Amino acid sequence: MVITLKCIKKKTSLVLLVFLMLGGCFSTQKPPVTIAPSIDKRLYEIPQQPLTMGIYIDPDLRNHEQIEKVSNHIIGIQDFVFPVGKPLAEKIRETCQIIFREVIFLNNLDDTALPEEKSLDGILEFRLKDSDIRLKIEEAVLHAVGEHKLSLFVTLYDAKWNKLWEEEVFAEGIGLDVVTSHIEWEWWITSGPKFGPAVDMAIEKITFHLAQKLTVVKKILNK
């Protein structure tokens, strides 16, 4: 396999050089990285709390997007766009729907409009603390490695927005993309390595850690 990959590198080196030159400044920005995290099945083993909770996800978290640059002679200089906020917010919502009997999503901090005959036991606010994505390519073995360190703040309020509790939640995801065929090599050149799985892992882990933290909500609210 090593010999095959070396041959691939030799045969495509000239084509790659021309491709990069025609692209201008050896730089391209790829379409947004596909991020599709799952829910950890262990979430369904956590006892549901008989609470009606308001859920507020900060706009900076919901809309968070970051661009990470990779510079390498194999793929040139490429900007990878990571739309982290939308899938992260979706998994936070899904987690809360599993953990609590009923949830009502709030559009803003002043959102007091509730369905008739509904009252909140408490309110949870979620804010992004940090999202650190690091990308690298190990040329000798044609491996691409993505690392994502993700952290959130979760804050619990009573129904009148009095702060009762706050906690930080952290998770780290790692993804590995390996070239094992000529087709995968061509994909690397045209579309870049697959860095999305690192973000998927971080989101999957942080939502499970979040669910574990939220098991104290009923006790804190004295419900």
Image (cartoon, rainbow, N blue to C red):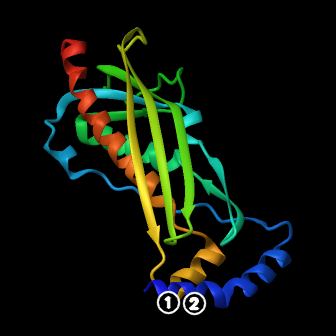
Q: Amino acid at mark 2?
A: Cys
Tags 2 and 1 touching, CB below 8 Å: yes
Q: Position of residue 184 (x, y in %)?
A: 52, 81
Q: Is residue 92 above or below residue 155?
A: below
Q: Quadrant of residue 69?
A: bottom right
Figure disc tally: 2
Q: Quadrant of residue 171?
A: top left
Residue visible at 56% across and 68% down? Answer: 139
Q: Quadrant of the N terminus?
A: bottom left
Residue neighbourhood size for the residue with mark 2, other residues' Cα within 10 Å, grouped as few (<14), some (14–19), many (≥20): few
Q: Quadrant of residue 205?
A: top left
Q: Position of residue 44 (x, y in %)?
A: 18, 46
Dot label at residue 159: none
Q: Residue under circle 2?
A: 7
Q: Residue under circle 1?
A: 4
Q: Is residue 34 above or below residue 217?
A: below
Residue neighbourhood size for the residue with mark 1, other residues' Cα within 10 Å, grouped as few (<14), some (14–19), many (≥20): few
Q: Quadrant of the C terminus?
A: top left
Q: Position of residue 197 (x, y in %)?
A: 43, 59
Residue visible at 44% across and 54% down? Answer: 198
> Can residue 223 be seen?
yes
